[in-house]
Image (tube, rainbow, N blue to C red):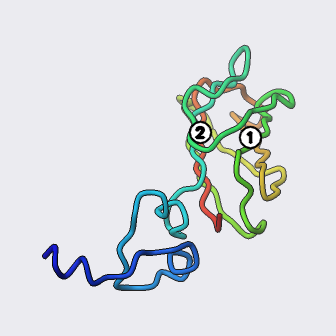
Amino acid sequence: ELQALATKSLDDQAAMEAMTAGRVVTADMQIYNPLHPKVRALINLSGTVAITYGYGTASVTDNGAGDITLTWTTALSNVTWCWGANLNNTGGRSYVTEVSQTSTTLRVKCWFDGSGDDVTRLSLTIWGDA
């Protein structure tokens, strides 16, 4: 198997983004795979807003009740990207809405029963073209 591996080409950014088959992927190229999350953040909005875990994150800004802006370190190549979120509220109706996005920021608002809510655990994941 090692001999077969030795004949393969190493992946580069363009091949990863095109998902070219038959290439060897090294750890430093994995970030360019379109299916690989580019940013992950676990944020506490209660009290002083803080990133409690982050990958590719730069900062978080408190814009008001349940309203934050997450900024990341490496700009995505465009604003055509997607995100997913999860928050921890019990009972009632809880959800997250997008306020705005750029190639380096995502502004969201957390809601609980129709009002902005400073949740203790908001998880955000960003997928896009690095």
Count of numbered marks: 2
Q: Is residue 67 above or below residue 44?
A: below
Q: Quadrant of the N terminus?
A: bottom left
Q: Amino acid at mark 1?
A: Leu
Tell me residue 124's x, y (percent). Answer: 60, 44
Residue 14 quadrant: bottom right
- Residue at position x 57%, y 26% from top? 52
- Secondary structure of the residue carrying tag 2 is strand
Decide: few, some or many residues near mark 1? Use Cα within 10 Å; few <14, some 14-19, many ≥20: many
Pointer 2: what residue?
41
Q: Amino acid at mark 2?
A: Ala
Q: Residue furthest top?
A: 47
Pointer 1: what residue?
70
- Residue at position x 74%, y 33% from top? 59
- Residue at position x 71%, y 45% from top? 72
Mark 1 or mark 2, which is nearer the start of the sequence? 2
Q: Is residue 30 left or right of residue 69?
A: left
Q: Quadrant of the C terminus?
A: bottom right
Q: Is residue 53 above or below residue 124?
A: above
Q: Are marks 2 and 1 in contact (CB under 8 Å)?
A: yes
Q: Is residue 1 above or below residue 89?
A: below
